[in-house]
Image (cartoon, rainbow, N blue to C red):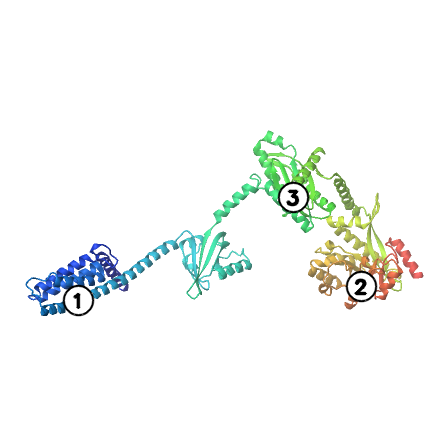
């Protein structure tokens, strides 16, 4: 009912406005604006004056309509003018002849006209009141019509192609449009009352959302790319705009979010990017992308102090495959080569096809030592050769193809990428000249060094089986010069090279993983010797120190292997001391502590070797179940002449005592060094002053001599 009444009211108002617009307003212009009302009023008054004496009531049928019509035609101002002028003209110009002029008649006429002037004034103001009423409701009706029009426009705009979501100030969803439900997969009933968190894909961290809301709070809006989740779980990209709606007091009442699904645009961008930076046949990076990555790698190698290598690869006799089997078979071969190359490298490396049958592999994060980096590059090169030597199956046929590889190293950006390409290309042609199916380095001298290193690795692998390793022992003494222990040190007795010092093969053993079986051999040999020493009173209390590498220590079965060696040889665990380097404490500290505690529980001792040269934390140091700290020889060597070394040694000794740890100094070569150490509280020593590392036979002779002394 209320809607019907409102509709009727609006229709009445509309008709009034239309009538008013047809009759005229104060703003009308033209001759009739004043002339026509005056003529009408004059005629009306003349009729009144002429017939009034006979029919006075007839005046109301002429005068009032004339006044009303005059006001309507010209407005209330023109109506008043018409009353004044018309009354004057009718009275004094158009007075009928049967009226004689006299003072009485003039007074009567004046009084009569005054009365009717007042009547005209009342009528004029009545018309003006109606006019203002019409204007007021015409304005209201216009506003209502405009509001209705805007509502119709807003309704159409709300159902646009963009998804729209309206929330309250707390983020609860109040309304969404059809595009929103189609895009997200949620129905209106499912989404109303929820918060936008329902759409989160978890691809953005808290910092992303913090920056978003900071922008909304500061400027009232935000827009950007967001990854959201549809109802079916699909994650998709969209361009989102959020605007805060505020009331007159500046308080946020609502948030309006509009979004556009940009999945297709992203796909198109990705296709364009692939065409620009990737080889369409193999989907590998092309020359352009490789150059970009190479320049970035060359810049970062100097900053990260890491090396890199470029491997230029060309397939041997590829043209004959195209000529005999056709280009389709050749393309198939290139695709298989691309897959195999990718499987041979790490995730950080880049495999690219730069054209034809030429591929380039860029290796990053290699060692900053030239020889080690070259060895790493060669290892991957040999792996590639082995992989590409496997048979290919093309069109039901089995065939073989081999590569020739040229390698060049880079460790900074002093050489441009073009120079590196040339160097790798030259090395590749050297590989082809050498018979194909091989690799060559750009620097011939480096190639010779690599060959030597490869030969050394090959011989190192044979050393264990051939029993070429030996243990030498260096005595450890107390302040009285009496031996209390020895350190077992590995030596390699090569059948051709003679005695190879540890610094020439230990790093290679670490790199190749051979350090683990070598370390196991050292542990077994040391335990075996401890068992032999139990039979003699002179050696039965000696403590055997054995060095353990990080790779060996972090093996999952390290504790088991140590315990097995102890039980197998039935030795006293307290006579076995494992020496760990300080650098081992930098990583996996919790695992380190757990492993040490497991062995400490059965009595195995631990010494922290080379203390002072690493970066161990004192917080972790006090948690380690250590028995001893070993002062590095670099501090002992100049202790008599360098006050800094002397201060460092004093600090280490004081710290060891405060932690209830034994302390031993290595590299002691003079009586002066020993005396300084003794004065500072160090009572255990190891060094050439007391004996060099020697075979077991010489050690036992030394022990007998010390005993006799």
Q: Earlier in the sequence, mark 2 or mark 3?
A: 3
Q: Is residue 111 left or right of residue 320?
A: left
Quarter assignment of residue 323: top right
Q: Can the viewer see residue 395 in this picture?
A: no
User: Would you identify the image quadrant in which residue 331 lies?
Assistant: top right
Residue position marked by numbered label 1 in the rendering: 117
**Percent of width and height locating residue 545:** 81, 58
Depth check: give the residue in front, 197 or 680.
Answer: 680
Circle 1 crowding by C-alpha within 10 Å: few under 14, some 14–19, many from 20: some
Q: Which mark is residue 133?
A: none
Q: Is residue 499 visible?
A: yes
Asked if marks 2 and 1 touch (Cβ < 8 Å), the reply is no
Residue to which mark 3 is pinned: 362
Q: Is residue 219 left or right of residue 525?
A: left
Q: CA distance from mark 2 to mark 1?
A: 123 Å
Tag in front: 2 or 1:
1
2 or 3: mark nearer the eye? 2
Q: Secondary structure at mark 3?
A: strand
219 or 319, nearer to the observer: 219
Q: Secondary structure at mark 2?
A: helix
- In this view, the residue in front, 560 or 497, is 497
What x and y, as percent, mark residue 511?
A: 73, 49
Residues marked 2 and 3 touching at CB (< 8 Å): no
The secondary structure type at the circle numbered 1 is helix
Q: Position of residue 434 (x, y in %)?
A: 72, 34
Which residue corresponds to mark 2? 647
In front of the other: label 1 or label 3? Answer: 1
Q: Residues within 10 Å of mark 3 (few under 14, many from 20)?
A: many
Q: Position of residue 302 (x, y in %)?
A: 68, 49
């Amino acid at each position: 009912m209320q809607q019907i009444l409102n509709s009727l009211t609006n229709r009445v108002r509309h008709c009034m406005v239309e009538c008013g617009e047809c009759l005229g307003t104060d703003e009308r212009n033209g001759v009739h604006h004043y002339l026509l009302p005056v003529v009408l009023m004059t005629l009306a008054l003349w009729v009144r004056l002429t017939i009034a004496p006979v029919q006075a009531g007839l005046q109301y049928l002429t005068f009032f309509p004339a006044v009303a019509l005059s006001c309507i035609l010209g407005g209330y101002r023109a109506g008043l003018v018409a009353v004044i002028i018309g009354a004057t003209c009718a009275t004094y110009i158009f007075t009928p002849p049967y009226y004689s002029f006299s003072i009485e008649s003039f007074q009567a006429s004046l009084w009569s006209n005054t009365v009717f002037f007042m009547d005209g004034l009342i009528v004029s103001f009545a018309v003006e009141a109606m006019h203002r009423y019409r204007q007021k409701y015409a304005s209201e009706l216009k506003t209502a019509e405009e509001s209705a029009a805007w509502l119709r426009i807003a309704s159409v705009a709300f159902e646009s192609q963009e998804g729209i979501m309206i929330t309250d100030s707390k983020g609860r969803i109040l309304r969404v449009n059809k595009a929103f439900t189609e895009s997200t997969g949620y129905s209106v009933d499912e989404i109303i009352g929820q918060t936008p968190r329902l759409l989160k894909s978890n691809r953005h961290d808290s910092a992303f959302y913090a920056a978003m809301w900071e922008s909304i709070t500061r400027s009232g809006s935000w827009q950007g790319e967001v990854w959201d989740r549809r109802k079916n779980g699909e994650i998709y990209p969209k361009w989102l705009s959020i605007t805060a709606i505020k009331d007159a007091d500046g308080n946020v009442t609502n948030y309006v979010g509009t979004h556009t699904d940009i999945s297709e645009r992203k796909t198109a961008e990705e296709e364009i990017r692939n065409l620009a930076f990737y080889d369409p046949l193999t989907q590998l990076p092309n020359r352009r992308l490789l150059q970009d990555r190479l320049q970035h790698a060359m810049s970062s190698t100097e900053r990260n102090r890491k090396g890199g290598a470029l491997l230029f690869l060309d397939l041997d006799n590829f043209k004959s495959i195209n000529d005999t089997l056709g280009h389709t078979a050749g393309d198939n071969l290139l695709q298989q080569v691309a897959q195999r190359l990718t499987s041979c490298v790490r995730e950080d490396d880049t495999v690219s096809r730069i054209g034809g049958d030429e591929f380039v592999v860029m290796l990053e994060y290699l060692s900053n030592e030239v020889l080690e980096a070259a060895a790493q590059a060669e290892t991957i090169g040999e792996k590639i050769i082995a992989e590409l030597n496997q048979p290919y199956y093309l069109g039901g046929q089995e065939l073989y193809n081999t590569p020739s590889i040229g390698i060049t190293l880079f460790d900074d950006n002093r050489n441009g990428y073009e120079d590196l390409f040339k160097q790798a290309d030259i090395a590749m042609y050297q590989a082809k000249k050498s018979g194909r199916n091989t690799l060559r380095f750009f620097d011939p001298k480096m190639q010779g060094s690599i060959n030597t290193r490869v030969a050394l690795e090959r011989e190192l692998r044979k050393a264990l089986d051939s029993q070429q390793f030996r243990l030498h022992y260096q005595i450890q003494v107390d302040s009285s010069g009496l031996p209390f222990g020895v350190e077992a040190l590995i030596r390699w007795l090569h059948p051709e090279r003679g005695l190879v010092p540890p610094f020439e093969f230990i790093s290679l053993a670490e790199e190749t993983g051979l350090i683990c079986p070598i370390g196991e051999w050292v542990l077994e040999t040391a335990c075996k010797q401890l068992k032999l020493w139990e039979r003699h009173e002179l050696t039965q209390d000696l403590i055997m120190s054995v060095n353990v590498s990080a790779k060996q220590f972090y093996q999952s079965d390290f504790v088991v292997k140590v315990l097995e060696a102890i039980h197998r040889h039935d030795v006293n665990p307290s006579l076995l001391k494992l020496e760990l380097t300080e650098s081992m404490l930098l990583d996996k500290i919790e695992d380190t502590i757990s492993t040490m505690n497991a062995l400490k529980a059965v009595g195995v001792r631990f010494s922290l070797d080379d203390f002072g040269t690493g970066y161990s934390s004192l917080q972790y140091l006090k948690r380690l179940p250590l028995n001893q700290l070993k002062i590095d020889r670099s501090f002992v060597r100049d202790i008599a002449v360098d006050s800094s070394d002397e201060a460092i040694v004093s600090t280490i000794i004081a710290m060891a005592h405060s932690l209830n740890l034994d302390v031993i100094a290595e590299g002691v070569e003079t009586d002066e060094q020993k005396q300084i150490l003794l004065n500072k509280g160090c009572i255990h020593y190891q060094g050439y002053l007391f004996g060099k590392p020697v075979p077991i036979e010489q050690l036992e002779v030394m022990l007998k001599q010390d005993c006799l002394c």
